[in-house]
Amino acid sequence: MTERYAIILAAGKGTRMKSKLYKVLHPVCGKPMVEHIINRVEETAPAEIITIVGHGADKVKEQLGDRTKYALQAEQLGTGHAVLQAENFLKGKPGTTLVISGDTPLLTSETLQNLFDYHQGKNASATILTAKAEDPTGYGRIIRDHVGIVEKIVEQKDATLEEARIQEINTGTYCFDNELLFDALSKLDTDNAQGEYYLTDIIEILKSEGKNVAAYLTEDFDESLGVNDRVALAKANEIMRQRINHQHMVNGVSFIDPAATYIDDGVVIGAETVIEPGVYLKGNTVIGSDCVITTNSQIVDSTIEDGVVIKTSVVEESIVRSGADVGPYAHLRPKAEIGVNAHIGNFVEVKKATIGEGTKVGHLTYVGDATLGKDINVGCGVVFVNYDGKNKHHTTVGDHSFVGSNANLIGPVDIAANTIIAAGSTINKDVPEGAMGIARARQENKEDFAKRFPFFQE
Ligand code: UD1
Ligand code: CA
C-alpha cells in the first residue's frame, strides 16, 4: 500500500466570522471544527499529519497538541501557499497526500476513505472531492469538458456568469500524488481576482503536464459544508446535532423533540433514557440508562448514573449516583457527589460536597464544602456556612441525623451520627453522637400583648 499523508489547512483568520476566536476553533457540537477534522483524518490512518497554522497558531497547537506536526504560514497568501509550507516535511516522499480544510467539520471518515480508494483506483495524480450544491454561491466550481473530464476549478470571484451556474463544487478536500503536488506548487502564481496562490490552480497545472486528474462526487452535499461565516456555523451545528441525536435514538434513547435537544459530540447516553426539549448535554458527560432529563436542564462534564431523574436543573462537573433525583431548579456546582437514591429538591445548591446514600435535601438549601452521611434529612432553608470572607471551611454530618429547618451550620464543625439539630439553630460547636444541638433564644409568651398592637381589632 502507498504511504498516506495528510495536510490540514488552518492558518486563515476567518475574516467573515467577524470574531476574536480564530475560525477553525469555533465549536460545532462542543468541539472546535479543526478537532473534528483531525479526528476524521486520524481514522484514515495517515503516516504523518501536518497542520498549517498562522492566525492563532498557538491556540490551534494547544488544541491539537502532539497529534500532528505543524508548519507555520507566516503570511496568509492563499491555500496553495499554505500547502507549500508543508514541503519541509513531505517534499519528495512517494505516497498519497490528503489535503483538507479546517473549516469543513461535517466530512466523514467514510467519505475520506472513499476518496482515497477512488484516487487509487483511477491511478490519478490528483482527485478532487466534489459535491452538487443547490446553491453553489461562494464555492469553487468544477469545470468539466464535453465528455465530463475535469479541466479546472474556478473560484466564485473569478467565474464567468456561465461558470457560476455550475452546481458541482470543490469541497476543498483532495488527494494528490505527493511528489507531483510539491512540484506543481512551485509553479503557482497569483494572477486571479484575489491575488492569492490558489491551491485549486494545481489542477490546471497538472492537466497541462498531461497528468490524470479525477473528481469523486459525494452524494451528500451537507457533508461538504464549508464554514466561512456564522450562518454556515449555525447550519453545521444543526446538521451535526441531527446526526448525533439520530445515533442516540438508534441506540435506544428517547427524545421528545430531537430538533430542540443539544448534545455535544462525544456525550454517552444509555438506553431507555428520556430527554425532554431544551436540554443541553455538554462536554465530557455520561448519562446512564433509564434516566429522565426534563426540559431546560444543562449538564456539563458530569456523570449521571442509571435511573436518575434530573428535573430542569444545572449540573456542572458533578456525579449523581443511581436512583437519585435532582430538582426542579437545583444547581449542582463542581465536585458535588449525590449518593445512591439521594434526593436534592428545589432551589438547592450543592458545591464540593458529598451527599450520602438515601439522604434528602429537599428545599431552599445551600450545601458547600461538606460531607453528609447516609439517610440524613436536611430541612428547608438550611445553610452550610462555609466561608469567612477569606477561607472555606468544611462541615460533616453523620448518618441518620436530622437537621431542622433554617439551621446554620458554621464550618468547620463536626456533627456526629444520629443527632438532631433543632430548627433555627446556629451551630458552631461540634455535636456528639446521639445529642441534640440547639442554639436559639428560648421562647417567651407575653400575655395580652397583641391587643396593644395597632393591627389588632376588637
Ligand atoms: C476554498 C477553495 C474553494 C472551495 C472551498 C470549499 C481555494 C482557492 N478555494 O475556498 O474552491 O470551494 O474552499 O470550502 O482553495 N487557509 C490557510 N492559509 C491561507 C488561506 C486559507 O491556511 O493563506 C486555510 C483556511 O484557514 C481554511 C482553508 O484554508 O481552513 C480554506 O480557506 P478559505 O479562505 O476558507 O477558502 P474558501 O474561500 O472557502
Ligand atoms: Ca472555506
Image (cartoon, grey):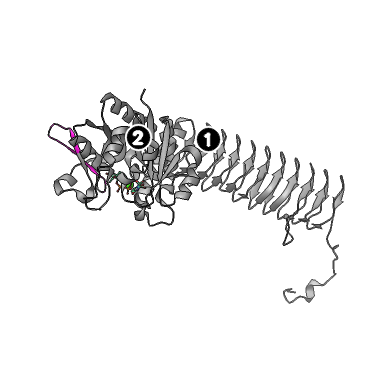
Work out whether residue 325 can be spotted.
yes
Q: Which residues are magenta?
A: 138-151
Q: How many marks?
A: 2
Q: Which mark is residue 98?
A: 2
| Quarter where residue 375 is shown | top right
Dot placed on the residue nearer the N-terminal end, 2 or 1: 2
CA separation, marks 2 and 1?
Answer: 34 Å
**Left or right placement of residue 437 versus residue 197 in this view:** right
Work out whether residue 257 can be spotted.
no
User: Residue tagged by mark 1?
Assistant: 269
Q: Quick check: is 178 in the magenta stretch?
A: no
Question: What secondary structure is marked by label 1?
Answer: strand
Rendered residue at 72%/41% (across/down): 356
Rendered residue at 28%/41% (across/down): 185
Residue type indicated by callout 2: Leu
Residue type indicated by callout 1: Ile
Give the x, y percent position of residue 299.
55, 45
| Quarter where residue 130 is shown | top left
How crowded pointer 1 is (Cα within 10 Å; few <14, some 14-19, many 20+) is rated as many
Q: Is the N terminus in the top left, top right, bottom left or bottom right quadrant?
A: top left
